[in-house]
Image (tube, rainbow, N blue to C red):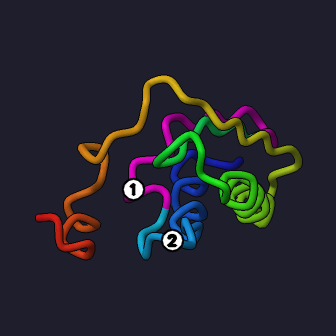
């Protein structure tokens, strides 16, 4: 059975190409739901006008599909609540130099 932990682990290999931090540590992943072989992810972007949104969501979907046992994946881009820098993990803050 697929677990949320496996999904979050896979998403740690998904990056916004403009920021050298994965989408999990950036705080862009709002929710992960797993039901049997189906995974649903709600995520956002650092800005609604980000031109890379489709590519990031497609990359996230591709990485999740690589998890053994996953048959269906839905990655939804949402804008509520709006993302803000307080969602960035401490490790990512250090990497970005925003302590």
Q: Is residue 96 left or right of residue 52?
A: left
Residue at the farthest left position: 99
Of callouts 2 and 1, the N-terminal one: 2
65 versus 49 height, above or below: below
Determine whether label 2 and label 1 are within 8 Å by CB. Answer: no
What is the x, y in percent for residue 91?
23, 67
Question: Which element carries disc 2, helix, strand or loop?
Answer: loop
Q: Is residue 95 left or right of residue 71?
A: left
State the residue at coordinates (47%, 66%): 22
Please rate how many residues cluster around mark 1, counting C-alpha atoms within 10 Å: few if below 14, some from 14 to 19, many from 20. Answer: many
Please rate how many residues cluster around mark 2, counting C-alpha atoms within 10 Å: few if below 14, some from 14 to 19, many from 20. Answer: few
Q: Is residue 3 left or right of residue 24?
A: right
Residue bearing the label numbered 1: 26
82 versus 60 height, above or below: above
**For this rendering, which residue is in front, 83 or 64?**
83
Camera-side mark, 2 or 1: 2
Q: Quadrant of residue 16?
A: bottom right
State the residue at coordinates (64%, 39%): 41
Q: Which mark is residue 18?
A: 2
State the residue at coordinates (50%, 45%): 47
Question: Is residue 68 within the magenta segment?
Answer: no
What is the x, y in percent for residue 61?
76, 55
What is the x, y in percent for residue 68?
78, 62
50 versus 30 height, above or below: below
**For this rendering, which residue is in front, 23 or 18?**
18
Residue range in magenta is 23-38
Question: Which element carries disc 1, helix, strand or loop?
Answer: loop
**For this rendering, which residue is in front, 36 or 59?**
59
Question: In the picture, which quadrant includes the C terminus?
Answer: bottom left
């Amino acid at each position: 059975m697929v677990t949320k932990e496996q999904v979050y682990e896979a998403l740690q290999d998904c990056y916004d190409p403009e920021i050298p931090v994965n989408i999990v540590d950036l705080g862009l992943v709002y929710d992960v739901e797993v039901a049997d072989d189906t995974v649903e992810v709600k995520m956002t972007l650092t800005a609604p006008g980000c031109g890379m949104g489709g590519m990031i969501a497609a990359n996230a979907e591709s990485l999740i599909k690589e998890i053994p046992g996953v048959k269906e994946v839905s990655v939804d881009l949402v804008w509520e609540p709006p993302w803000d820098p307080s969602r960035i993990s401490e490790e990512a803050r250090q990497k970005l130099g925003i302590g």
